[in-house]
Amino acid sequence: MYVRADDIKSSEYIGKEVTIRGWVYRLRKQKENTFVLIRDDRGGIIQSVFPSEKVTKLTIESSIKITGILRQDSRAPDGGYEIKGNDLQIFHIAELDFPIGEYQSSELLLDYRHLSLRMRRMIAIAKIRVSILKHARQWFIENDWMEVTPPTIVKDAVEGGSTLFKIKYFDEEAYLSQSAQLYLEAMIFSLGRVWSLTPSFRAEKSKTTRHLAEFSHLEAEAPWVDLEDILQIQEQLISYIIQKTVAERIREFALLKRDVSNLKKVKVPFDRIQYEEAIEILQSKGFSIIEENGKKRNIIKGDDLNIESERELTRNNEKPIFIIGYPIRVKPFYVKEDPHNEGVGLAADMLAPGGFGEISSGGLREENISSITKRIEKEGLNPHAYKWYLELRKYGSVPHGGFGLGIERLMRWIINVEDIKDTVLFPRTMSRAMP
């Protein structure tokens, strides 16, 4: 019977013959015996023991099948179980110059990402990612949302034209999508609450540790909601994802040496802070920003929050917080202006604790065709390019809103890594499109 390593580490299999397939993870040769650590196709590790003369050809990452008797030995790594091998089948002998050693630079690991994915750390991260996506989908299913698949080839900008990737689309010019939001807004009239998980693309010339050119974008839109509804949806979703993922992937978090005690405290409700209050907090700490001309000055009301200010606001938090009521001028054209507070947008950003910054942004959308047309023109965009989108405001427009959540930014906080490139299997950045 073929089994995986983690499945057979049980008293149920002691003394029984088992067969496992995988790759040589480590070799420790002695005069009489050789210890072969085999990694299965889910990253599980178990030790096997063979007479040294039987395994002379083996190299790291050779693909093999081992059959033997399972026994317990407290000295064996990864749980104290090992296989006393009696048969070894070799599928392929790997070349000796495997480029991934125990200690390598981050750049080399990125250059050889197709091979470094085999590292236990990367396997653990990949499994946590699987759980995050699974439980996100499950939350939406349990709460009666419809999953949809919007296009990723578009003709108009959502988050500003300067960050669009231009492509040749037959004889026309088109772009890779920055967000599915406009299409989700169209779907609420026929499907109600909708959500999607799609790749989004931003041509930002940024080399920070939290920017990717291609990222996984979870977005949701709903009719007949107010801002508090949108905040509650987000906090319930995030809390659900984290609690379920921590319970399911406790071994992977342990392998990453991630203390999950704070994650277990991430339960609703999350604190809400008004934008003006956030500015006052930053001013009380003497926080300053650097302008485009390089001059340094104290932060004032009207400034957008940058990475450093978001980090300062959440440095000592255990749960995410919402910053509510940004100036409308720093938000995209579709954000609805507060009818009771001129110049303020009915929008909020969720900031992750511990200084990890913004992980989601959402709010109400402007449903009035006259108001949103003026906003489009003010942004220097062509209303004609948004003809189909504006028509949504002509035929039964309703109050509606939603949010967008960056999966990699969420993961960066959950697994507690500095560089967002560690959260995705094949990262795409300003300087990297390979492998």
Image (tube, grey):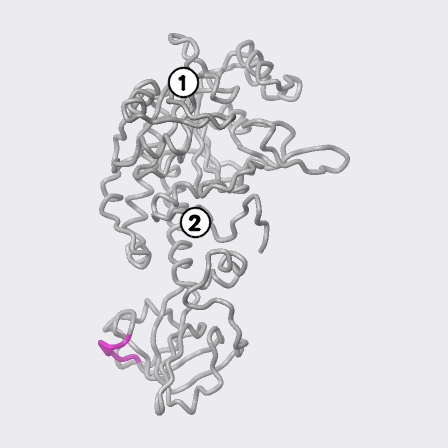
Residue found at the very far right of the displayed protein: 171
Horizontal arrangement in the rendering, residue 230 relative to residue 163 (left or right): left
- Spatial separation of the CA atoms under disc 1 and disc 2: 31 Å
Which secondary structure lies at badge 2? Answer: helix
The correct choice, above or below, for 58 with respect to 206 in the image is below
284 or 398: which is nearer to us? 284
Q: Is residue 42 magenta?
A: no
Magenta stretch: give its range.
Answer: 70-76
Left of 395 or right of it: where is 8?
Answer: left
Residue 300: x %, y % from top left: 38, 18
Q: Nearer the viewer, mark 1 or mark 2?
A: 2
Q: Position of residue 151 (x, y in %)?
A: 59, 36
Q: Residue at x 26, y 50 (%)?
A: 259
User: Quick check: can you spot residue 290?
Assistant: yes
Q: Amino acid at mark 2?
A: Thr
What residue does disc 2 label?
A: 423
Residue found 29% across the figure and 49% down from its top: 246
Instruction: Please give left or right for residue 258 compared with residue 197 in the image.
Output: left
Please state the horizontal and vertical placement of residue 340, each as a whole percent of the image. 38, 7
Q: Is residue 310 above or below residue 87?
A: above
Query: Which numbered disc, 1 or 2, marks the residue that appears first in the sequence?
Result: 1
Q: Quadrant of the N terminus?
A: bottom left
Callout 2 environment at 10 Å: few (<14), some (14 to 19), or many (20+)? many
Front-lying residue, 199 or 2: 199
Circle 1 residue = 346
Q: Secondary structure at mark 1?
A: loop
Q: Are marks 1 and 2 in contact (CB under 8 Å)?
A: no
Tell me, yes or no, whether the highlighted magenta stretch contains residue 72: yes
Mark 1 residue crowding within 10 angstroms, few (<14) / some (14–19) / many (20+):
many
The amino acid type found where label 1 is placed reads Leu
Instruction: Indicate which disc residue 295 carries.
Output: none
